[in-house]
Image: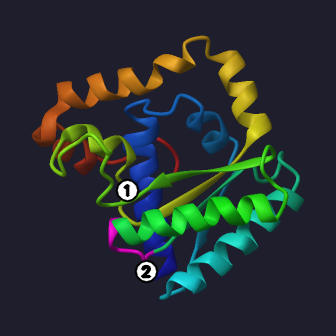
Amino acid sequence: MNEEIINTTRHWLTRAVIGLNLCPFAKAVYVKDQIRYAVSEARTFEGVLADIETELKFLAETDPDQTDTTLLIVPHALANFAEYNDALHFADTLLKQLKLEGELQIASFHPNYQFDDAESDDIENFTNRAPYPIFHLLREASIERAVEAFPDAADIYERNMATLRRLGHAGWLEHMKRDAKFKS
């Protein structure tokens, strides 16, 4: 079961995030096989937070050349986006309690992701929509290096919105049905 969850997540990563270049920094760590895919078996809010703590500690203690980033996939909990956002708030608090703020950060992806100023069916929400609730644990140093290498990093958000508007809902669905172009 976890293999299927990870394969579904990899497909989303390669087709959406890398394939549409929604994150120009993702391809390098993907190609170098530096992404850890951790599947949470938690079915409760508290269980998810315990898994986040475990994965934050793991990433902080691991050589970045081996594991640069972690996707903590939560297939059995936090289906409600509001509950997921609450967990994200507690995860950020946990990051501070572990004294990892400034070293690691957490990005958010969810099947029902919705920006504050958007309607639920707005295509722009798909920049952060994933097949499962995901907590993306990233190293600050890696982000800093990537931003230095990508001079227009501040424009990524606007470019992503424009890409999704051009695709539209039908184009998104068609794009996501295709096989991934990168290794699985």
* Residue at image location 48% in from the left, 42% down from the top: 182
Q: Residue at x 43, y 33 (%)?
A: 22
- Which quadrant is the N terminus positioned in? bottom left
Task: Please name the amino acid that badge 1 sits on.
Answer: Ala
Query: In which quarter of the view is residue 28 placed?
Result: top right
Crowding at mark 2 (Cα within 10 Å: few <14, some 14-19, many 20+): some
What segment is highlighted magenta in the picture? Answer: 75-81
Q: Which of the two marks, 1 or 2, is nearer to us in this view?
A: 2
Q: Position of residue 103 (x, y in %)?
A: 81, 46
Which element type, helix, strand or loop, lies under badge 1?
Answer: loop
Image point 43% across, 73% down: which residue?
Answer: 4
Question: In the image, is 80 to the left or to the right of 109?
Answer: left
**Does the magenta run of residues contain 58?**
no
Which colour assignment does the render follow? rainbow
In the image: residue 99, left or right of residue 180: right
Crowding at label 1, few (<14), some or many (≥20) Cα neighbours within 10 Å?
Answer: many
C-alpha span from label 1 to label 2: 14 Å
Say which mark, if any, is on residue 22. Answer: none
Residue toward you, 119 or 79 = 119
Q: Nearer the viewer, residue 162 or 80?
A: 80
* Residue that label 2 marks: 77
Please provide percent x and percent y for residue 104.
Answer: 75, 49
To which residue does mark 1 refer?
130
Q: Amino acid at mark 2?
A: Ala
Tell me residue 158's x, y (percent). Answer: 37, 22
- Secondary structure state at the residue bearing disc 2: loop
Which label's residue is closer to the chain start, 1 or 2? 2
Question: Is the residue under label 2 in contact with that under label 1 (CB below 8 Å)?
Answer: no
